[in-house]
Image (tube, grey):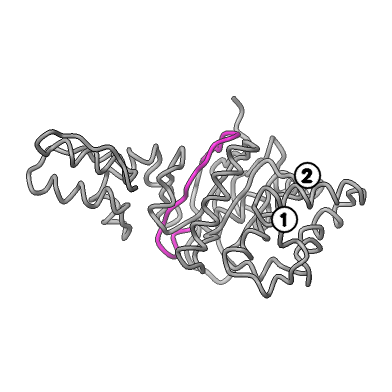
Amino acid sequence: MEPIIHLQNVSYRYPDGTDNALENVTLSFQPGTFTAVLGHNGSGKSTLAKLLNAILLPAEGQVTVKGMDTRREENLLSIRRTVGMVFQNPDNQIVASVVEDDVAFAPENLGVPPAEIRQRVDDALRRVGMYQLRLHAPHLLSGGQKQRVAIAGVLAMQPEVLVMDEPTAMLDPAGRREVLDTIAHLRRETGVTVILITHHMDECIGADRVLVISDGRPVLDGRPAEVFSQVEELRALGLGVPATTEALWELRRAGLDVPLDALSTQACCQAIAALLPGGNFNGKGL
């Protein structure tokens, strides 16, 4: 299968920087997959996100979206339609005083016919669970609700790829859960390709792939269980691991034979229960 996004030997340097934000990066993202991107502050992960829909252009190398070179101006509109971006602060993406008007903003600017805009807005708001609040003022919403409106605004453009740059960073735990549940729902409903930039390890557990960026280069790349089992390597990069992996790692250090790939809470509890007399865990209450 052809990748929906491909980076070939890509480097990028900010005008005021002395070092490359990204250096000689070659990566591919397959259609319909969920990739979580991790890295410490300044690692280059947000730069990577902005290169994926031509907010930034590579200084060297090539980024292609469905075969379209992001450096070619005539491709820009098609690329932006294909790759939608959701940023850290939803207030920076909300431009209207009514929720449904905000969601309609992007398709209106793309020249979508009014009747189709109405349908797209309603569909997008239903997908993120915000249809009942379509006539509300965005500034009266919670942080999690605002971020769901921002996601709806991108969905109304009907992108094939959703790039989310730390969308839960400014949210409380309830808001984070709202956004993560929305992402999971969208993947089930639409099969959209998701690239999630995050610094929350637990947000990566349900991903198909975890990509770790450090000093402008990919350093770890694989299934979540594969990447998070490399606890010492992640700590050396200034990163942590999910709480479940941390608990199992400490048990292994204490000499107990437990797997490190039990990432979910239930799987972790089952692994621990297997050490106990009877070795049964039914998961009730989780």
Pick whichever, 8 or 103, lies toward us. 103
Locate residue 233, reporting x and y percent: 27, 50
Residue located at (65% from left, 57% from top): 56
What percent of the width, then of the height, locates residue 183? 56, 48
Q: Secondary structure at mark 2?
A: helix
* Circles 1, 2 touching at the beta carbon (< 8 Å): no
Secondary element at tag 1: helix
Q: Residue furthest bottom?
A: 139
Q: Residue 131 location, x and y as percent? A: 72, 55
- In the rendered image, the vertical position of residue 182 relative to residue 105, given as above or below: above
Residue plotted at (38% across, 41% down) = 224
Q: Residue furthest top?
A: 1
The front one of 24 and 45 is: 45
33 inside magenta stretch: yes
Q: Quadrant of the N terminus?
A: top right
Q: Which amino acid does the dot numbered 2 rest on?
A: Ser
In the drawing, does residue 82 fall left or right of residue 168?
Answer: right
* Residue underneath mark 2: 78
Question: Residue 145: which disc?
Answer: none
User: Marks 1 and 2, Cα distance to the nearest angstrom?
Assistant: 28 Å
State the residue lying farthest toward the front.
Answer: 284
Looking at the rendered structure, which numbered label has been put on residue 131?
Answer: 1
Image: magenta residue range: 26-44
Q: Name the amino acid type tagged 1.
A: Tyr
